[in-house]
Image: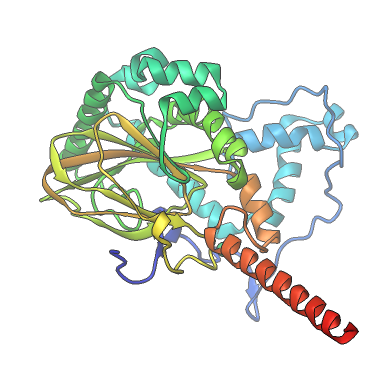
């Protein structure tokens, strides 16, 4: 087994930025927040209310968050206030929950994306809106339109528990995406723009969401990956996936060579090879583990190695431990979509007990049950002997 040390939690590198306290007043090491105790939301939303649109405002929270929160405003405010008044009210509430460092980071990242999108000229505009019939192979489209476990099983292999592989992308789409990424990287070189890499582990590759593909990828997650995940990964929030991180990674002699053993910062990971010609670069998977058991031993039945083929996808839980072997010749480029569920993450914060999806938690649970049964048997046996 090719463990090289402890498993690493893979995070997008922009997470490291901006954890300072900013301009907030700090006294004796304690942050002082303004108090708006009178600002409250209603318990039940006003279901018939049509929310305002906040897209045009420069806000430190997502405009969508304001639109969905608006229905929870007190009726008096909802009926008689201007949009600005509503924004201020909701903002005061949100500020209590969202640390300033995080807001600064989100704002900086939004500006970074804006700078790229307003300067970069896309090569293939047709990639920026999802055209299912042009992107996906017919078998995949048919399975998703039927949307049953059977329809998915018909096109998928499950060579190891929780690892699904299937034909997904058309060769023409793969070629266009490769050309688009090359075009973007050429622009980065020519303009000397400092880009953020996809995560802490890959030195090469690019974040697709950063140069305009965010909406297309969101739709890909919502209309294609979430329905599949609802069937196969409901135990890790598969039916409530609500955000994504989409990027490409590049392997080869003058790129990243391999990737250490790790878990993803995702609930469900889609990994599709785009090309080109290469040798090596196998994906090795080693069982699903929770935070507590991430470094526990691999069971023989969990050992699985997979060889990438262009257009073919692998879908697995983010907590499925894995890595990539060295790409020994040629160039390999893979498209990754990390899909996340904020509902699942919120629930996990408060429930740290045994996970149904962690193989080690389940093994421990079975062992406890076995011991309990053995102890009961022994007790009954003893009682029997005393009775005689
Ligand atoms: Zn566990």
Give x and y (percent) for residue 210. Answer: 37, 38
Q: How many marks?
A: 0
Q: Looking at the picture, how far across and down is residue 27, in whole percent?
A: 66, 77
**Side (left or right) of 78 relative to 241:** right
Let me know if residue 84 appears in the view.
no
Q: Is residue 207 left or right of residue 362?
A: left
- Please indicate whether residue 255 sits to the left or right of residue 93 in the image: left
Q: Where is residue 86 shown, x and y percent of the image?
A: 75, 36
Pinpoint residue 267: horizontal percent, then vertical percent: 52, 47
Q: Is residue 177 above or below residue 323?
A: above
Position of residue 14 relative to residue 183, above or below, is below
Residue at the location (59% across, 63% down)?
361
Q: At 66% across and 59% down in the image, what residue appears? A: 349
| Residue at position x 83%, y 43% in the image | 41
One can see residue 271 in this view? yes
Q: Is residue 139 left or right of residue 203?
A: right
> From the viewer's perspective, is residue 214 above or below residue 205?
above
Task: Identify the image's colour scheme: rainbow, by chain, secondary structure or one colour.
Answer: rainbow
Q: Nearer the viewer, residue 357 or 28?
A: 357
Question: Which residue is at the far front?
Answer: 388
**Vertical arrangement, residue 263 with respect to residue 111, above or below:** below
Q: Quadrant of the C terminus?
A: bottom right
Residue drawn at (45%, 24%) of the image: 154
User: Where does the N terminus fall, quadrant-wise?
Assistant: bottom left
For residue 123, which quarter of the picture?
top left
350 and 180: which one is in front?
350
| Ligand 1's quadrant | bottom right
């Amino acid at each position: 087994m090719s463990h090289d040390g402890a498993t690493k939690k893979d995070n997008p590198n922009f997470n490291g930025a901006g954890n300072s306290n900013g301009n907030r007043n700090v006294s004796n090491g304690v942050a002082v927040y303004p108090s708006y105790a009178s600002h409250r939301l209603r318990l039940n939303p006003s279901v018939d209310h049509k929310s305002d649109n906040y897209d045009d405002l420069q806000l430190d929270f997502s405009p969508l968050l304001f639109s969905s929160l608006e229905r929870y405003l007190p009726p008096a405010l909802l009926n008689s206030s201007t949009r600005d008044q509503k924004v201020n009210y909701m903002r005061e509430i949100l500020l209590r929950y969202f640390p300033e460092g995080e807001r600064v980071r989100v704002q900086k990242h939004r500006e970074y994306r804006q700078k790229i999108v307003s300067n970069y000229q896309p090569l293939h505009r047709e990639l920026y809106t999802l055209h299912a019939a042009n992107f996906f192979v017919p078998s995949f489209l048919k399975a998703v339109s039927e949307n049953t476990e059977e329809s998915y099983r018909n096109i998928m292999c499950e060579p190891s528990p929780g690892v699904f592989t299937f034909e997904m992308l058309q060769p023409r789409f793969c070629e266009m995406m490769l050309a688009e990424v090359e075009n973007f990287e050429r622009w980065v070189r020519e303009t000397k723009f400092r880009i953020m890499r996809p995560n802490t582990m890959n030195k090469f590759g690019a974040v697709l969401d950063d140069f305009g593909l965010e909406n297309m990828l969101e739709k890909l997650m919502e209309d294609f990956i979430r329905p599949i995940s609802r069937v196969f990964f409901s135990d890790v929030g598969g039916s409530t996936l609500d955000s994504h991180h989409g990027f490409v990674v590049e392997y080869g002699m003058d790129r990243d060579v391999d990737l250490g053993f790790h878990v993803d910062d995702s609930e469900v990971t889609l990994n599709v090879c785009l090309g080109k010609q290469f040798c090596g670069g196998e994906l090795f998977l080693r069982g699903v583990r929770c935070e507590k058991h991430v470094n526990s031993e691999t069971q023989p039945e969990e050992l699985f190695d997979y060889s990438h083929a262009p257009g073919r996808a692998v879908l697995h839980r983010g907590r499925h431990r894995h890595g990539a072997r060295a790409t020994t010749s040629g160039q390999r480029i893979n498209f990754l979509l990390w899909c996340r569920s904020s509902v699942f993450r919120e629930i996990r914060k408060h429930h740290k007990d045994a996970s149904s999806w962690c193989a080690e938690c389940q093994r421990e649970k079975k062992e406890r049950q076995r011991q309990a049964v053995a102890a009961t048997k022994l007790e009954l046996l003893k009682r029997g002997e005393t009775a005689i």
